Amino acid sequence: MKITDVKFELIKMPLKKPFRIAFATQTYSVNALVKVMTDEGVWGIGEAAPFGLVTGENAAIVIEALKVFKQGLIGMDALNIEGVHEMMDRLLKDNTSAKAAIDIALYDIKGKAMGQPLYKLLGGYTNQIETDMTIGIDTPENMAQEAKLRVERDGFRILKVKCGRDVESDICAMKLIRQAVGPKIRLRVDANQGYSLSDAVYAMKAFEKIGVGAVEQCLPWWDFDGARLLRQKTDVCQMLDESIHSSQDAFRACMMNAADILNIKLMKCGGIYEAEKINAIAEAHHVSCMVGCMLETKVAIAAGVAFAAAKKNVTEADCDSFMYAVDPEMGMKGGFKVDGGRYTLSGRPGLGLDIDF
């Protein structure tokens, strides 16, 4: 099954309201959709959702990378995913969201060619997962109000709260959120590299008293030693996100006992191919994984949810970003159904999405 053409175009995803984290505020995302076509009439869809502060890319860089990859892809076997990654890594270093777009499209092709939904190809553990809903940084009072709304109106049972700008304000916000949603809702915090080691220790001990189950990426991405010390000094489950871009990063974190959970993002690691390596390394070291997301449409979300559902070692999911959009569907029907935070994947082949361009 030879690749005959690769098409790509940019799409803009406006958000319902500004989304604020420790180091950035976003009002929209510009992503790239990719279509890979073959000589047997089977085609696949992928998506790149770049975020410069994490992947080092923007939309323009992604398009230029895809132009380079297209030259290498024409004539290759669409089912030779390992060979495609070897080619992309040889041509360009990094550019992980552009690589993820190609990767997702190839796995969509593989599922369609074999007549199986993607989650079954990747392991088939279950067809359902539960995601959290993320609460962006705002005043503590507004964050508590939104948290209550997400639980009572939208049915979410897990909340991830963005923190990392001011420790005392973060602790205040978490106290108010716990009061607003009650004791049964699971809470986790994402500091997005916003704390020093001393602030992180102080915050995590306060969060533990509030009933926070996990804290994500307190320290700068490069500080594996700090992450190990933080894990030794506190009892709250520690998750690494920005530190984990590759299987090499996963190995380092596991060998250093620097994390309880690794957050895998397809845009950050280059797609499902590398995500499988990260999860396998983590599982071998008795470290669980979460699948997260950037500001992605249903295309990349469908791929991430399929990966999460397929793997027993992926115990958590943060696959909510398409819900922030003014139009969450964006004309992309299928793939999965959502009830509150509970996803049920389609049984259709590949990603199971009704989309073409």
Image: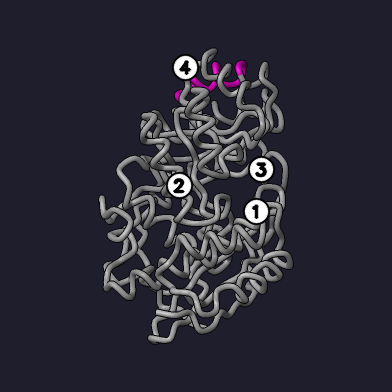
The residue type indicated by label 1 comes to Asp
* Tag 4 near tag 2, CB within 8 Å: no
Indicate the quadrant containing the N terminus: top left, top right, bottom left or bottom right: bottom left
Q: Main secondary structure of the magenta part?
A: helix
Separation of residues labelled 4 and 2 (CA atoms)? 23 Å
Contact flag, marks 2 and 1 (Cβ < 8 Å)? no
> How far is mark 3 from mark 1, CA to CA?
24 Å
The numbered mark, 3 or 4, whose residue comes first in the sequence reads: 3
The location of residue 349, given as percent across then percent down, is: 31, 72
Tell me where the magenta segment starts and ends, as one range. 201-212
Numbered disc total: 4
* Residue at the spot of label 3: 21
- Viewed as shown, does residue 200 lie left or right of 111? right
- Residue 316 placed where, x, y %? 40, 41
Q: Position of residue 273 (x, y in %)?
A: 45, 55
Marks 3 and 2: CB-CB under 8 Å?
A: no
> In the image, 53: left or right of 35?
right
- Residue shown at 65% from the left, 28% from the top: 219
Q: Which residue is mark 2?
A: 291
Q: CA distance from mark 3 to mark 4?
A: 24 Å
Which mark lies nearer to you, 4 or 2? 2
The residue at which mark 4 appears reads as 235
On the image, numbered disc 1 is attached to which residue? 94
Residue at mark 2 to residue at mark 1: CA–CA distance: 20 Å
How far is the residue under mark 3 from the one under mark 2? Answer: 18 Å
83 lies above or below 199: below
Mark 1 falls on what kind of element? loop
Give whichever of discs 2 and 1 has the lower sequence position: 1
Q: Amino acid at mark 4?
A: Asp
